[in-house]
Amino acid sequence: MKKEKDFSPISGYMMLVVVIVLAVISLMLMSWHSPVAILTIGLMVIMMPGFFFLNPNSSVVLVLFGEYSGTVKTNGFHWANPLFSRKPLSLRARNFDSDKIKVNDKVGNPIQIGVILVWQVRDTFKATFEVDNYESFVKLQSDSAVRRLAGQYAYDNFDVEQEVTLRSGHDEVNHALEENLRNRLDIAGIHVVEARIGSLSYAPEIAGAMLRRQQAAAVVSARFKIVEGAVSMVQMALDQLSKQGIIELDEERKAAMVSNLMVVLCSDKDVNPVVNTGTLNH
């Protein structure tokens, strides 16, 4: 299997001097009516298409009669065999922001997901000869990688918080996406600089139901924290009353006090106090 190889062209400035010299010689020969002028003019015309220049982070793949000759990556003014066919390739980093595609996540929920990919051509031979169109190849393989990623993770998990999901496991999910894309695009000589999920949402047909489920889960979680804190506060109050000997409470009075404190602490509305002017039993 062939690989990319560097090609060192001749300096374009040196060959430009040669062409100018040939032009001067041709004018002199024409003034002398010499038939040799036809040869020098023909040679000069043949040499002219060999000039080309490269901007920074650009390259040119050279092919001679179907045979790969090499790749020029040095920027500047160059000259090469005029019979070479030249295909320019940009080596600059590019962004690809994919459209949202509708797929099913690990648990079967329909979601919409898109990817942002930063990539660049690393191997010009593979990009030119291993695939038909490397730009289309990047787009198709990106969509395929996103579909595979969605099948590996759930969008969200309301039951097991430790499980990595598309919504919560940003670093791990994006790393898995990058590795998948690197393996897929290596055949085309493409280097993946960065890949991450650009857009993520439930499909419209279930978005409303999932929003209500998320809200319910949030309410349950908040209630759990409130109750947990209220129990700790009631325990602390009973311990302080007992330790400081402020009042002696039997089991019945403790139960009544716990009930009242739990109502006050766990209620989502303001509690109206009732002032007891009698004894604790009335």
Image (cartoon, rainbow, N blue to C red):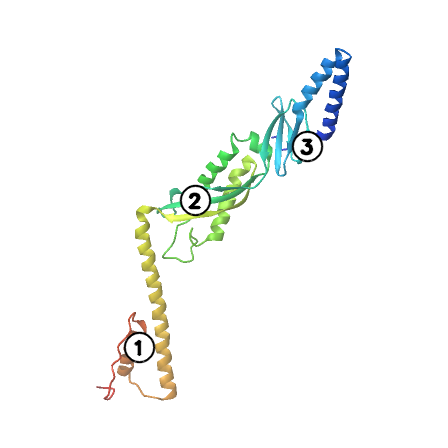
* Badge nearest the viewer, 2 or 3: 3
Q: Quadrant of residue 273?
A: bottom left
Taking the spot 30% from the left edge, 52% from the top edge, the residue there is 209
Tag 1: amino acid: Leu
Q: CA distance from mark 1 to mark 2?
A: 50 Å
Asked if 207 appears above or below 41 in the picture, the reply is below
* Badge nearest the viewer, 1 or 2: 2
First in sequence: mark 1 or mark 3?
Answer: 3
Per the image, label 2 sits on a secondary structure element best described as: strand
Asked if 256 appears above or below 210 in the picture, the reply is below
Closer to us: 257 or 29: 29
* Badge nearest the viewer, 1 or 3: 3
First in sequence: mark 1 or mark 2?
Answer: 2
Picture quarter with the N terminus: top right
> Residue at label 3?
77
Closer to us: 141 or 117: 117
Taking the spot 36% from the left edge, 85% from the top edge, the residue there is 242
First in sequence: mark 2 or mark 3?
Answer: 3
Asked if 139 appears above or below 207 in the picture, the reply is above
Q: Quadrant of residue 92?
A: top right
Closer to us: 187 or 134: 134
Left or right of residue 228: residue 180? right
The residue lying furthest to the front in this view is: 31
> Residue at label 2?
114
Dot 3 surroundings within 10 Å: few (below 14), some, or many (20 or more)?
A: some
Per the image, label 3 sits on a secondary structure element best described as: strand
> Residue at label 1?
261
Asked whether residue 252 appears in the rendered view, the answer is: yes
